[in-house]
Image (cartoon, rainbow, N blue to C red):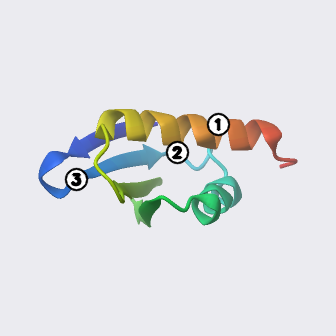
Amino acid sequence: MGFFVVEGKGVAVLELNPAFYPEKVIDLAISKTKNLEIKKSMQGKKIRLELKAKEKVNLKELALEFSNYLLSSMKNSKL
């Protein structure tokens, strides 16, 4: 997992390896997240998520918290 912040756009970007983060878990987490705008795309072999909060937040913390949410979702899923 890698991430970076695009301050000018107010976006945190996560780049995820689908071999570790199952796409079903990512899609489920996206569908359950209501306070973020999330754009999902493929960048080579990685899944790229662009996270934009509806209110002002620390973008680095946003990226880290969402990745923790994904890990928690993986732990609790039956995949």
**Residue that protrudes farthest toward the front in the picture:** 55
Say few, some or many: other residues with alpha carbon within 10 Å of mark 1 (under 14 / 14 to 19 / 20 or more): some
Q: Quadrant of residue 54?
A: bottom left
* Residue nearest the viewer, comparing 39 with 19: 39
Q: Secondary structure at mark 1?
A: helix
Q: Secondary structure at mark 3?
A: loop
Residue drawn 18% across and 57% down?
9
Residue named by callout 2: 17
Residue carrying label 3 = 10
Q: Nearer the viewer, mark 3 or mark 1?
A: 3
Q: CA distance from mark 2 to mark 1?
A: 13 Å
Q: Can residue 21 be seen by looking at this rendering?
A: yes
Answer with left or right where residue 9 lies relative to residue 3.
Answer: left
Q: Position of residue 27 (x, y in %)?
A: 63, 62
Residue under the image location 88 percent in, 47 percent down: 78
For badge 1, the amino acid type reads Leu
Mark 3 neighbour class, 10 Å CA radius: few under 14, some 14 to 19, many 20 or more: some
Specify the amino acid type for callout 2.
Asn
Tell which residue pokes out farthest to the left in this image: 8
Disc 1: which residue: 71
Residue 37 image offset from top left, x and y in percent: 41, 64
Do labels 2 and 1 touch, CB within 8 Å?
no
Q: Position of residue 56 (x, y in %)?
A: 28, 48
Is residue 14 or residue 69 the one in the foreground? 69
Left or right: 27 in relation to 74: left
- 14 lies left or right of 26: left
The residue located at (62%, 45%) in the rendering is 21
The kind of residue on which mark 3 rests is Gly
State the residue at coordinates (38%, 55%).
51
Q: Element at badge 2?
A: loop
- Closer to the chain start, of discs 2 and 1, is 2
Q: Position of residue 50 (x, y in %)?
A: 36, 57
